[in-house]
Image (cartoon, rainbow, N blue to C red):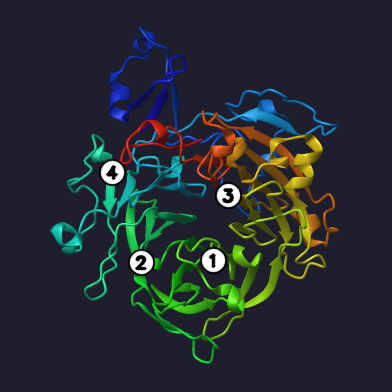
């Protein structure tokens, strides 16, 4: 399934594979501009020609390009070229943006990716995931919907796979190309309620959908080109601390489970809260034990009185979570901190804090330090949006055994103010961050929805492992992407503007704009895009 964009009038076409085969190439230019055909849910930063390769050691870095012209499909924007002596820094316009085929409202409220997959969360309990590489290009997308009562779905109750079944509600003209899934968490008389936003996380060929009491994991069978149901978590609302661990445990309040989620290699972390007055949030850790996902630990807030969480639950412990290998990072904006946990090995499986990073920037007032996180083996990117000037993202060294462990390698405010970019004074810098690590370097991306910009930073991870001096030359900005204007007063733009959600998909950068066109459609109608 490819998408076509009418390059002159801006209208979009949606062509199935069969329709393309029936349409003579010569007829495409009659009466309208010839469409540019794009891979499903195309994203802007296709940094190298050819197929996206897996991220990780040995994978080519996107920074092998030499100039902005090498970024596929990206015209240079105003101000491109050398800026204040930096021969490698450019400003470019965002590339093509995806059609919201799944008809989600606030499409890209959450966003995750891998070399093969992209998952997009929207409002009203819906999310979608689909292939973005040739390895699975014949697979249907999977649409996750929380608004179909389980008792009204006997086909699902029978335990069969979802592929090929009738679409039921929210029918689509692309039903034949859709697998559908509904949350399968049911404990006693309680069933998942319809959430506002479905949060998504991707690790390699697995996708986690989470919100309102249920975390469901779906996998991809590349050989059979189909989706495979993996697990629904938690299996019980009871929090069971590991034997010997100093954890309180308790019973979870179901509607507060899964407001954030992170999926890793055999590890998943999701936010939760104990069903008791004044109980602070916790982060529940699940691990793949043999062939079964099980709850193995509960990470509790250690900030004393600061752990109290108001009714709005903004900035609480667990406002952001990230997983990489045996480590879990948890953001706690109300306390201005991020806690990095390490699984110590042995049995039972437990995660213990190894370092707490705190906001040390005097200019960062009313900050949400830790509101967004992205964790790698060598780097941790922390977003710190604020109500006013001084917002930023900070890159830390977390390379095991490095002399610079825990040190600041880069922070965006310094770069933004030196170059006179809007992010110098914007309050939403760091609303979203993402990170991809390669064998010798890494690519970090930072969103600034108020300025409709995304900043891409290159880090030398070899230097980081060797103990690069704090705030030295280990990380340097490479590119600023200017997104489409919001059409509103910049000060009225919220964190759902361009760059409000970010992810990597192989060698592509996925940039979400959940509020795109939402002001001109109804509350249940499709809006939002990914570039």
State the image coordinates of residue 27 (x, y, percent, origin top left).
34, 10
Decide which of tag 2 and tag 4 comes sooner along the chain.
Answer: 4
Left or right of 503? Residue 426 is right
Q: Which is more foreground, mark 4 or mark 1? A: 1
As helix, strand or loop, the secondary structure at mark 3 comes to loop
Residue furthest bottom in the image: 244
Examine the rendered structure and indicate whether residue 174 appears above or below residue 412: above
Q: Which residue is mark 3?
A: 432
Examine the rendered structure and indicate whether residue 10 appears above or below residue 452: above
Q: Residue at x 82, y 68 (%)?
A: 403
As helix, strand or loop, the secondary structure at mark 2 comes to helix
Residue 290 seen in this snapshot: no
Decide which of tag 4 and tag 1 comes sooner along the chain.
Answer: 4
Decide which of tag 4 and tag 3 comes sooner along the chain.
Answer: 4
Q: Residue at x 82, y 54 (%)?
A: 471
As helix, strand or loop, the secondary structure at mark 1 comes to loop
Could you tell me how far apart the alpha carbons at marks 3 and 1 are, in whole angstroms? 17 Å
State the image coordinates of residue 310 (x, y, percent, origin top left).
49, 67
**Numbered tag placed on residue 255 in the rendering:** 2
Left or right of 465? Residue 486 is left
Examine the rendered structure and indicate whether residue 69 appears above or below residue 150: above
Q: For the residues labelled 2 and 4, say whether their Cβ atoms are less than 8 Å apart.
A: no
Residue furthest top in the image: 31
Q: For the residues labelled 3 and 1, say whether their Cβ atoms are less than 8 Å apart.
A: no
Could you tell me how far apart the alpha carbons at marks 4 and 3 are, in whole angstroms? 29 Å
Q: How many marks?
A: 4
Decide which of tag 3 and tag 1 comes sooner along the chain.
Answer: 1
State the image coordinates of residue 434 (x, y, percent, origin top left).
60, 50
| Of residues 86 and 430, the one drawn nearer to the viewer in this rendering | 430
Q: Which quarter shows the N terminus?
A: top left
Q: Which residue is mark 4?
A: 178
Q: Which residue is mark 1?
A: 316
């Amino acid at each position: 399934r490819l998408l076509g964009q009418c390059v002159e009038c801006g209208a979009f076409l949606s062509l199935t594979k069969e329709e393309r085969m029936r349409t003579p190439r010569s007829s495409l230019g009659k009466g309208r501009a010839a469409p540019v055909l794009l891979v499903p849910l195309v994203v802007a930063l296709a940094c190298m020609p050819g197929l996206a390769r897996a991220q990780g050691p040995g994978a080519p870095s996107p920074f092998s390009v030499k100039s902005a012209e090498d970024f596929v499909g990206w015209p240079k924007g105003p101000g491109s070229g050398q800026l204040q002596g930096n021969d490698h820094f450019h400003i470019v316009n965002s590339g093509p943006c995806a059609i919201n085929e799944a008809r989600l409202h606030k499409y890209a409220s959450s966003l995750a990716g891998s070399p093969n997959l992209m998952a997009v969360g929207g409002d009203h309990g819906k999310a979608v995931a689909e292939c973005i590489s040739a390895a699975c290009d014949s697979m249907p997308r999977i649409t996750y919907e929380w608004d179909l009562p389980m008792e009204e779905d006997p086909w699902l109750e029978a335990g069969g796979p979802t592929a090929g079944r009738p679409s039921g509600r929210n029918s689509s003209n692309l039903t034949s190309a859709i697998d559908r899934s509904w949350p399968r968490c049911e404990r006693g008389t309680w069933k998942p309620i319809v959430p506002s936003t479905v949060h998504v996380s991707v690790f390699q060929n697995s996708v986690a959908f989470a919100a309102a009491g249920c975390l469901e994991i779906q996998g991809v069978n590349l050989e059979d080109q189909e989706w495979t149901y993996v697990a629904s978590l938690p299996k019980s609302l009871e929090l069971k601390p590991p034997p010997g661990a100093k954890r309180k445990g308790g019973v979870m309040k179901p509607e507060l489970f899964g407001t954030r989620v992170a999926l890793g290699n055999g590890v998943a972390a999701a936010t939760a809260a104990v069903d008791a007055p004044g109980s602070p949030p916790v982060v529940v850790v699940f691990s793949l034990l043999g062939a079964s996902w099980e709850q193995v630990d509960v990470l509790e807030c250690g900030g004393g009185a600061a752990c109290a969480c108001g009714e709005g639950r903004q900035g609480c412990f667990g406002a952001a979570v990230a997983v990489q290998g045996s480590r879990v990072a948890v953001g706690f904006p109300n306390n201005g901190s991020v806690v990095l946990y390490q699984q110590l090995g042995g049995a039972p499986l437990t995660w213990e804090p190894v370092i707490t990073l705190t906001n040390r920037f005097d200019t960062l007032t009313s900050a949400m330090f830790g509101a967004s996180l992205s964790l790698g083996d060598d780097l941790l990117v922390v977003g710190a949006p604020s109500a006013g000037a001084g917002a930023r993202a900070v890159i830390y060294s977390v390379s095991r055994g490095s002399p610079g462990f825990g040190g600041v390698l880069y922070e965006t405010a310094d770069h933004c103010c030196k170059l006179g970019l809007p992010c110098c004074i914007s309050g939403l810098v760091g609303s979203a961050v993402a990170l991809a690590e390669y064998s010798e370097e890494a690519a970090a991306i930072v969103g600034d929805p108020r300025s409709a910009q995304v900043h891409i930073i290159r880090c030398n991870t070899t230097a980081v492992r060797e103990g690069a001096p704090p705030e030295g030359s280990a990380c340097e900005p490479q590119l600023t992407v200017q997104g489409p204007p919001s059409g509103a007063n910049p000060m009225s733009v919220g964190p759902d503007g361009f760059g409000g959600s970010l992810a990597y998909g192989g060698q592509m950068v996925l940039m979400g704009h959940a509020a795109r066109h939402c002001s001109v459609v109804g509350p249940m109608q499709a809006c939002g895009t990914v570039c």
